[in-house]
């Protein structure tokens, strides 16, 4: 027969856990609102930036800027964005599986990683892959300047021909319940082809100060904006995943409490019944 004290202690333990998961859900919901607002503000700018860049780069020769240089090298660099903390469902697992699949499918390449987030670093530091840089603690105070620093570093590695392609692997925020893992080529920048556009798009422009200067400035800004957007997407996805995970954990804890309470009541009833039987048997024995 189960021990009543042990069951009661376990019920209290699960209740304490439930209080923690509910609090974490509220914190995640608060952070999600800010992160969701930030990404919804950043997306239109990033889309328009890419649109302007495509218009300009599609009219320029490929050798006009080093970030447009498409070469046949096999040195691939992946910037993977994970979280520093856990308890966010399959958020990190999906990124790690996608990256591992990419590395397996491209074993013939010279692959290397830049890992943002402690969870990704904990996994890949024990695997046979070249890790160029770890960015730990980015979730605390990530801002545009840090995105600029990361973007400049990626651009430098590419222009110095230390890598031939740069990809980002991150969770794109769809909704609180849904995040989608994206593998996005960052470098070289591949502009849209004029052949697939309307005839009006083929009209050229007069550039001031000059075509090369404008393209250079746009590409620098593009690197920062794309990196910044990817980190914002990942941040919103992380908070959404954590909120969903903590909500699920709270509901599971509630179901466990109900089950344990039922078990406790049954065990208590059995103890009472047993004691009553012993009392009745004792009274009958005294009569005899």
Image: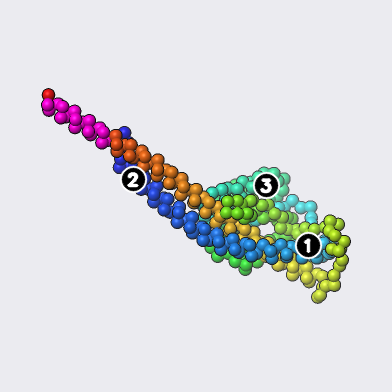
Q: Which residues are magenta?
A: 271-287
Disc 1: which residue: 54
- Is residue 261 in view? yes
Number of residues whose C-alpha sits closer than 10 Å to that of mark 3, classed few (under 14), some (14–19) or many (20 or more): some
Check whether the beta carbons of the residues at disc 1 and disc 3 lie within 8 A of each other.
no
Rendered location of residue 187, percent (x, y): 73, 58
Q: CA distance from mark 3 to mark 2?
A: 47 Å
**Which numbered marker is on residue 9?**
2
Rendered location of residue 211, percent (x, y): 82, 70
Q: CA distance from mark 2 to mark 1?
A: 64 Å
Q: Relative to residue 116, is residue 155 drawn left or right?
A: right
Q: Nearer the viewer, residue 49 or 130?
A: 49
Check whether the beta carbons of the residues at disc 2 and disc 1 lie within 8 A of each other.
no
- The earlier-in-sequence mark between 3 and 2 is 2
Number of residues whose C-alpha sits closer than 10 Å to that of mark 1, classed few (under 14), some (14–19) or many (20 or more): some
Of the 4 image quadrants, the one containing the C terminus is top left
- The earlier-in-sequence mark between 2 and 1 is 2
Rendered location of residue 195, percent (x, y): 86, 57
Q: Residue at x 49, y 55 (%)?
A: 25
- The earlier-in-sequence mark between 1 and 3 is 1
Disc 3: which residue: 102
Q: Is residue 218 magenta?
A: no
């Amino acid at each position: 027969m189960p021990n009543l004290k042990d069951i009661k202690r376990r019920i209290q333990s699960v209740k304490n856990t439930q209080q923690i998961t509910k609090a974490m859900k509220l914190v995640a919901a608060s952070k999600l609102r800010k992160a969701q607002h930030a990404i919804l503000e950043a997306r239109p700018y990033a889309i328009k930036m890419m649109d302007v860049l495509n218009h300009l780069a599609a009219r320029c020769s490929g050798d006009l800027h080093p970030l447009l240089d498409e070469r046949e090298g096999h040195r691939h660099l992946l910037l993977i964005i994970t979280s520093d903390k856990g308890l966010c469902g399959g958020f990190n697992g999906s990124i790690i599986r996608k990256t591992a699949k990419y590395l397996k499918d491209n074993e013939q390449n010279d692959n290397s990683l830049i890992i943002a987030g402690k969870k990704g670093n904990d996994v890949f530091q024990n695997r046979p892959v070249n890790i160029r840089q770890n960015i730990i603690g980015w979730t605390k105070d990530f801002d545009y300047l840090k995105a600029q620093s990361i973007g400049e570093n990626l651009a430098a590695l590419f222009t110095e021909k230390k890598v031939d392609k740069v990809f980002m692997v991150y969770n794109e925020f769809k909704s609180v319940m849904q995040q989608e893992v994206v593998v996005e080529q960052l470098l070289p920048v591949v502009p849209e082809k004029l052949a697939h556009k309307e005839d009006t798009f083929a009209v050229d422009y007069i550039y001031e100060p000059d075509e090369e200067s404008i393209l250079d400035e746009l590409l620098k800004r593009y690197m920062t904006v794309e990196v910044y957007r990817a980190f914002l997407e990942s941040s919103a996805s992380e908070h959404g995943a954590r909120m969903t995970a903590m909500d699920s954990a709270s509901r599971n804890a509630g179901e466990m409490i109900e089950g344990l309470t039922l078990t406790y009541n049954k065990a208590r009833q059995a103890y009472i019944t047993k004691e009553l039987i012993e009392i009745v048997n004792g009274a009958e024995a005294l009569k005899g």
